[in-house]
Image (cartoon, rainbow, N blue to C red):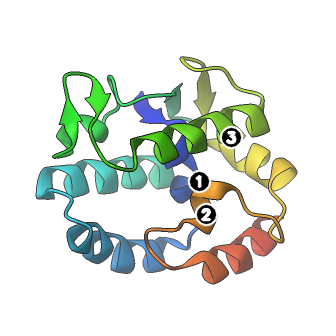
Amino acid sequence: MLNLRAHHLLCLVIPSEDEFKRVAPVMFRRKGYTNDYIGAYMGAFDTARSSPDVEIRVLDGPKEDDTCIHCGNYGGNVCLSPQASVFAEWDRELLVLFGLRAGGVIRVRDLYRLVREKINPKDMPGVCRGCLFDILDKCRENLYRLR
């Protein structure tokens, strides 16, 4: 089982695998993320892409998140990033959009279904509009293909 904040979910299923694997590590490094964090995030990505039946426990904060615990801004179960409130808002937005609750569990295949049903490529969620990887247009294209 993966344990991930809600705002991490979309990058697991929307971007093309090749694009994300090429861009994400570079952009994470540019934003100051640690190699341990990058490895954990890319590991979660690989697990989600290769195992559609894997379960994800959806979180609304960094505590117990498989990636956040490796972040340089992780401090005693809280996010110390200057962007912590933005990340928390993205978590809330996606929990509401998908009709999930913090601590709930979803399979990757069901996440794909929710993304197809709930996300309009013309009105992407806040986490996408604030894309760290600058691939929003490519994700829109991929979302159209997923639908």
Tell which of 110 and 4 is nearer to you. 4
Report the residue marked by disc 2.
Answer: 128
Question: CA–CA distance between discs 2 and 3?
Answer: 12 Å
Give the mark nearest the N terminus, 1 or 3.
Answer: 1
> Disc 1, disc 2: CB below 8 Å?
yes
Give the mark nearest the N terminus, 1 or 2.
Answer: 1
Residue sitting at x 44%, y 35%: 4
* Crowdedness near tag 2: few (<14), some (14–19) or many (≥20) residues, C-alpha within 10 Å: many
Residue sitting at x 74%, y 68%: 143
Tell me if I can see residue 46 in this picture. yes
Say which mark, if any, is on residue 93.
Answer: 3
Tell which of 120 and 117 is nearer to you. 120
Q: Which residue is outermost to the front?
A: 82
* Crowdedness near tag 3: few (<14), some (14–19) or many (≥20) residues, C-alpha within 10 Å: some
Say which mark, if any, is on residue 10.
Answer: 1
* Crowdedness near tag 1: few (<14), some (14–19) or many (≥20) residues, C-alpha within 10 Å: some
Residue sitting at x 33%, y 23%: 63
From the top left corner, tell me how far across and down residue 89 is, in percent.
58, 40
From the top left corner, tell me how far across and down residue 15 is, in percent.
56, 69
Kindly identify the amino acid type of the residue bearing the numbered disc 2: Cys
Q: Quadrant of the N terminus?
A: top left
* Mark in front: 1 vs 2: 2
Kindly identify the amino acid type of the residue bearing the numbered disc 1: Leu
Tell me if I can see residue 14 in this picture. no
* Mark in front: 1 vs 3: 3
In the rendered structure, the answer to whether residue 11 lies left or right of residue 26 reads: right
Query: Where on the picture, by quarter, is residue 144?
Result: bottom right
Tell which of 52 and 42 is nearer to you. 42
| Residue 13 drawn above or below residue 137 | above
In the rendered structure, the answer to whether residue 25 lies left or right of residue 137 reads: left
Question: CA–CA distance between discs 1 and 2?
Answer: 8 Å
